[in-house]
Image (cartoon, coloured by chain):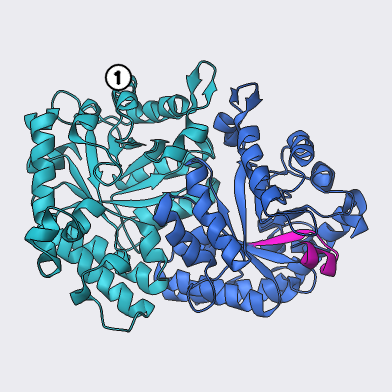
Chain colours: A cyan, B blue
Amino acid sequence: MAAAVSRVGSPVLVGLDPRYELLPEVLKDGSDTSSAVRATAYSVFCRGIIDVVASRVAAVKPQVAFFEQLGPAGMNALADVIAYAQQKKLLVIIDGKRNDIGSTATAYAEGLLGAEGQSPWGGDALTVSPYLGDDSLAPFVDVAQERDAGLFVLVKTSNPGGAMFQDLVAEGRPLYRHVGEYVEGLAAKTAAECGYGIVGAVIGATHPEQLSELRAAMPHTWFLVPGFGSQGGSAANVAAAFDPRGLGAIINNSRGINFAYTKAPYKEKYGAALWQEAAGAALSDMIDQLRSETPAGNL
Amino acid sequence: MAAAVSRVGSPVLVGLDPRYELLPEVLKDGSDTSSAVRATAYSVFCRGIIDVVASRVAAVKPQVAFFEQLGPAGMNALADVIAYAQQKKLLVIIDGKRNDIGSTATAYAEGLLGAEGQSPWGGDALTVSPYLGDDSLAPFVDVAQERDAGLFVLVKTSNPGGAMFQDLVAEGRPLYRHVGEYVEGLAAKTAAECGYGIVGAVIGATHPEQLSELRAAMPHTWFLVPGFGSQGGSAANVAAAFDPRGLGAIINNSRGINFAYTKAPYKEKYGAALWQEAAGAALSDMIDQLRSETPAGNL
């Protein structure tokens, strides 16, 4: 991740969130909204976004839920999108928020992160949920290590409701700090030359103070930061997520880039016919903001 | 669930955990271990288990991880197994431990629990993880309500590592009690004539004291109790999960029934050729134990 971010000089992660109702009409097949037709549209749309962003970002993050909603046809489209992104030298973080215990966790990890020829999807990293504890995370870590892949554990999420349990204070510190400590331990144990380990953390852009606090407490942990743009996080909000080199964080934007053509100022300038140009322009603006207002300018 | 459990007179939930290495050789296609071949074997195996248990249990619980591991072919097999179980009048609890926020959570819920013709799988209930908080659970509850389906939220899991975060004490009580309170609120709001709501809780058989404590604290919440058998939970351990009518809990057994043919005393008596008979005998023994040692005898 550090090498990829340094190569492109940008810490942006582009989420791939194909939502049928938001796709440009040109990608839809009139009134046929069967799963097969929608799955094809998802594939074409995500490939189109990948074409626009591939040279300027390190990674993309397909959201499994939208593909899964279409059934097996959607899961085929997900495999297609992942393979296409990897052909374009992008790292693929599968956003599945999976978790389970023992050999069941291993099945998820091998399915989503497994080696070529063994896994139908073969992502480079996977988001996972921590509620089940250390013995649920261990099988994911084992598979990720074997495969030279990564994990991002939910620590402090961007949604308002995340506070409900994550902010409960136990033994003098909030739950998200307990989870963060465990994640940092795994990251430190697996740290590479760049200083970061294979286990990262999801920490929302909507919590600038916690980003700063956790950056200090988790020096070996790469942060995946959602909530930029649509959810209200700004470049200034996420500055604390980076180390002074501009490494240590990737800032996700899904809807703000995917569907830029539906929103000012891109809607007026490009519109639906130029949905790819709109996505490209939104990405350029985001990269400029991050490079001017955060340590990502040092990349 | 209450009606189905009363009808069959047994509180057993049969987990469907197809693990290729444990399937009877007769279901395998020699050296061909392609995803398509394995997916077919999973489907045949699960149908075989369903045939044996259908008249004696209320529900089955396919574990998504094993199907997902095989890719789209596996997800097709999952749809086949769900449809077959529902034909046999079984309720199907999809064990996916999904979670996400906002419209992404809605996509998972509609995909896995959606109405016939809209969802590729159409389960009757889904397991979900609570770490993301109330606004992540709400979309699942909304879809479940529309569809007359159910949810089971992870509260106190059966694995030893579950204690790591779930047992942290905040505001005088452990995290699992906080999660349990929120779940009970949702259950109370949606309670039907039987006294139980559409939102249940996953609480491991390996924690008899907590089962008793939570039964008292969560009177409207149906419990899904994993960890019986393979993980060490006994009938006596789960007695406290029931109300005096024998309702309020379903006790899961996956490997102990699925692969009974590999374990004493069923291995000796039946062996691989009679794997279905072995599963049936293991189920009979479990039902007898639960009926004699728990309030399930009153069903």
Camera-side residue of B196 and A218: B196
Q: Residue at x 22, y 39 (%)?
A: A250
Q: Quadrant of the N terminus of chain B?
A: bottom right
Q: Quadrant of residue A7?
A: top left
Write down the residue under mark 1: A216
Camera-side residue of B40 and B123: B123
Tell me where residue B2 appears, x and y as whole percent: 78, 61
Farthest bottom residue in view: A31
Q: Quadrant of the C terminus of chain B?
A: bottom right
Tell me where residue B223 appears, x and y as whole percent: 71, 49
Tell me where residue B281 appears, x and y as whole percent: 81, 66
Q: Callout 1: few (<14), some (14-19), or many (20+) C-alpha neighbours within 10 Å?
A: few
Q: Residue at x 74, y 73 (%)?
A: B54
Q: Which residues are magenta?
A: B2-15
Farthest top residue in view: A172
In the displayed structure image, the side of residue B270 where residue B75 appears, left or right: left
Q: Amino acid at mark 1?
A: Ala
Q: Is residue B139 visible?
A: yes
